[in-house]
Amino acid sequence: MSLPDGVERRTFDGRERLATRGQPVYGEPTDGPWRLWDAGRSKLGAMLELDMGVGLDGDDGVLYLGAASGTTVSHVADFAGPTYAVEFAPRPTRDLVEVAEDRPNLFPLLKDARKPETYAHVVESGLDAVVQDVATRGQARVAARNRQFLHDDGRLLAAIKARSEDVTADPDDVFEDVLATLRDAYEVLETARLDRYHDDHLAVVAQPKTTD
Amino acid sequence: MTSRPSTDAGWFVGDDVRDAIENGSADGPADWPARAVDAGFADDEGDYYDRLHEATVDATRAAVQARERADDQQLVHAVRSMDDAERTANELAERVAEWAGALFEDVDTGVDGAREVAARDPETDAERRAVSLAQRVADLADEAEDCRAFVERTAPAVAPNLSRMAGPVLAARLIALAGGLGDLAKKPSGTVQVLGAEDALFAHLSGRAPSPKHGVIYTHDYVRHTRSEDRGSAARALAGKLSIAARIDHYAGDIRPDLHEELDDRIATIRARADS
């Protein structure tokens, strides 16, 4: 599986690592215009490292749910087109705004991903990808509610956190439940455990279910 | 007053785009870039995205500032700083006691001991370092006291009923544990009862321990000074009234004396069990 245009494997400290071109934001190592995209700090980065078919292309329109301080979304904005970043907590959003300031295609929004009607007047329809990394209960419902922003061939790229659904249950049971709910709105194309990089997370690549 | 666009319009319709981004809504998304160009808001797609960037960065920065400056957030920072400063002062005081104890006679432990060391006249290089470190401990302890004074001043303004019922410091701790007054107001009283006892709660949920009876509300007299057989009942009664107090403070803000009397009566009833 090839990487999206604008993402490359470069050598940092003798190892092949992911990198994008853009302004450094959190003191990450750089190599000329390229800056390291650390899969251990980014679930989407981990999905790319694991060669999942994320179906991303350079200049894609992206809605990023759970942008936090903007670590991952800064890399997305480096290679993608219009990138909408939704984050609910004020403190990390303060950093996210700083990250967005230097990136004309990154639009920060202090919104609750569970309530898309509060940002549907800003975020455009027909996007190529929804990236979801929200640490809230009901992650499958969040994905379903945000399906409206995708075009029919768009992709949901979700990192499902088991502990957010139920801290005591076996992660495998949690993932099964989440996937079952997710299948109401999406066709699940691929899943993979991210344990190598992030404990108890399941990466999901899915496509909107069409009615016909 | 700004005109609020209807629910099928984009953020760019209306005369205050910052307000529209923050408070507007729509039933669903649309091809906003094309619509904005059609409406004459932007010259072309590139121009639209430039304006969207400027508007979202502005509006979101303003929204973050407003949320972060809300007084309950100042209270949260202050009570956490107070705890950090106190804990660090105690930790460093142990180091001072060890070091100064090797240099001087009669060195007491704790922050008070460090204050005595800080008042000494050092003669050697090593003594200068130990006395200087002791001075930092004294300063940190003073800072913790100042933070506490700030909390005691601020909490009654932010959460009058909660502060009256729990005392300003415990009120601030509950708000900090919940993340804010609004968050605390939305929590069920069973959650308020065990705020601060998360480790014990998770141990219980995993089936390894009995359910915790109380979290930080243990520091309240009504829990601590009730005999242990009745402590669970007292904690439950207190948590129930505390969560009502938080809701009144968040949604209304006036003092309700009845609420406080009801709690006093209830605790008196629980404690009377000990006499029967």
Image: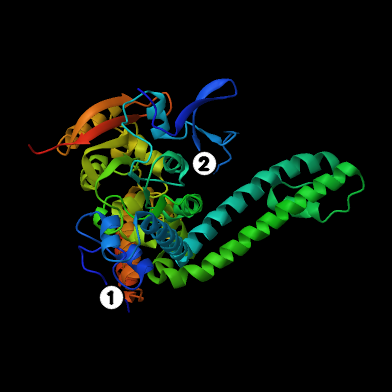
Direction left: furthest residue: A212
Is residue B214 placed above or below A48 in the rendered structure?
Answer: below
Same subunit, labels 1 and 2: the answer reads: no
**Amino acid on which disc 1 is placed:** Ser
Which numbered tag is attached to residue B37? Answer: none
Q: Quadrant of residue B234?
A: bottom left
Residue B176 at x, y = what percent? Answer: 45, 56
Q: Of A33 and A144, which appears nearest the observer?
A: A33
Direction top: furthest residue: A14
Q: Of B184 and A197, which appears nearest the observer?
A: A197
Residue picked out by circle 1: B3
Residue at point 38%, 44% (across, down): A81
| Contact between labelled residues 2 and 1, with CB atoms less than 8 Å apart | no
Residue picked out by circle 2: A22
Residue B192 at x, y = what percent? Answer: 35, 54
Specify few, some or many for label 1: CA neighbours under 10 Å numbering under 14, 14-19, or 20 or more: few
Is residue A22 placed above or below B115 in the rendered structure?
Answer: above
Q: Determine the secondary structure under disc 2.
A: loop
Q: Quadrant of the N terminus of chain A?
A: top left
Direction right: furthest residue: B123
Residue at point 27%, 65% (across, down): B39
Residue A160 at x, y = what percent? Answer: 31, 35
Q: For residue A23, say whether it is visible.
A: yes
